[in-house]
Amino acid sequence: MDLLKYSCQYMNASPPYTDEQLVTAIGNVAAVYYNTSGNTTSYCIDPSICGDQGTGGLGSDQLGWPWQECSEIVMWMCTLGGDNDVFPATCGGDPLPGLLDYCNQAFTPLGWKKDIMNVDAIAILYGLNLNGASNIILTQGHLDPWSGGGYRTDSPGVDPARGIYVVEIPGSAHHLDLRTPNTCDPNTITNARYQIANILKCWVDPSCTQPPVWQPLPEMIIPPANTECKDLNNQYPWGQDTLGSTTLLPQPTTSSTQISSSIRLEKLMRLGYFLSVLMRSITGKRIVKIVYKWPNNRASA
């Protein structure tokens, strides 16, 4: 059972609900994330006392995104609010003073000053559309709430002829396609990884003059609930037809030659990422966006 369906089972009771039943149901849904062990007996909901439980598990990296918001990735976010939800109406007006107040409280002890924040950095470094870009693969997982603000195939500047691909992946959570392949991945993610790997291979191969044409993903098949979830390291092409079919073939026996080939592919992908970071450090511009990280564990959401 995927995480979304598992969480929603707590909200499937027939209305009308009492206030206590609603709060209990929401608490059970939250516990899927905050109490995966089942051993937590109490919750702290005051971040001034216990910090942000959503990012606390990141250790020293938990201030990574807030620091970026207070420096070069200034994101305007608000909630519309309404009569049928718990969110306040925060849209409208200038959000900058509130963000500056947060940054001042969070980072002044670390040497932050107002002039560190550059609200125009994204527009200057990257542009606000894709018209001048090339060689970018943008994936959108249908189970990823952030995908609502992502690019679509008809967004301005999206052009496969310049290597701009927008890929919507049914059954994919937040950057699941960048995680280590796993036996419990839906076939849509497996096939998307395979096609992306072929595009990346073409980008780094001087003899490849015609990038692959993106093929429609297969109809989603979710592995049975009793499937043993385990990582598939060094097993490219993960059972995909090397001729470009979207048919998921039986997993072949992995030979030493296949392992060597897949290791070389992963090294190429890591090298591409390193080179893009190096070029950015030299020129101040992102030349190629491949992936922003290559985690060794798969998504948990």
Image: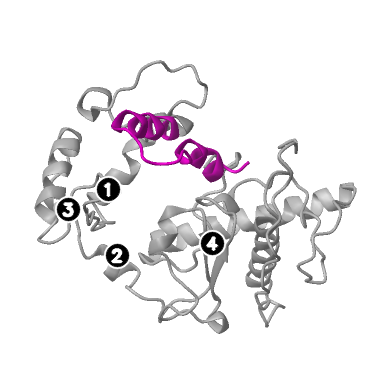
Q: Secondary structure at mark 4?
A: loop
Count residues near mark 2 (Cα–Cα under 10 Å), then give few for <14, some for 14-19, many for 20+. some
Bin the neighbour count of mark 1 within 10 Å (Cα to Cα): few under 14, some 14-19, many 20 and up: few
Q: Residues within 10 Å of mark 4 (few under 14, many from 20)?
A: some
> Does the magenta portion include 114?
no
Q: Which residue is mark 4?
A: 290
Q: Which residue is mark 1?
A: 85
Mark 4 is on which residue type? Answer: Ile
Q: Give residue 67's position: percent from left, percent from top.
A: 27, 45
Q: Which residue is mark 3?
A: 89
Which is more N-terminal, label 4 or label 1? Answer: 1
Residue identified by numbered label 2: 122
Question: Which quadrant of the rendered structure holds the N terminus?
Answer: top right
For marks 2 and 1, give the CA distance: 32 Å
* In this rendering, the label closer to the viewer, 4 or 3: 3
Element at label 1: loop
Amino acid under disc 2: Ile
Nearest to N terminus: mark 2 or mark 4: 2
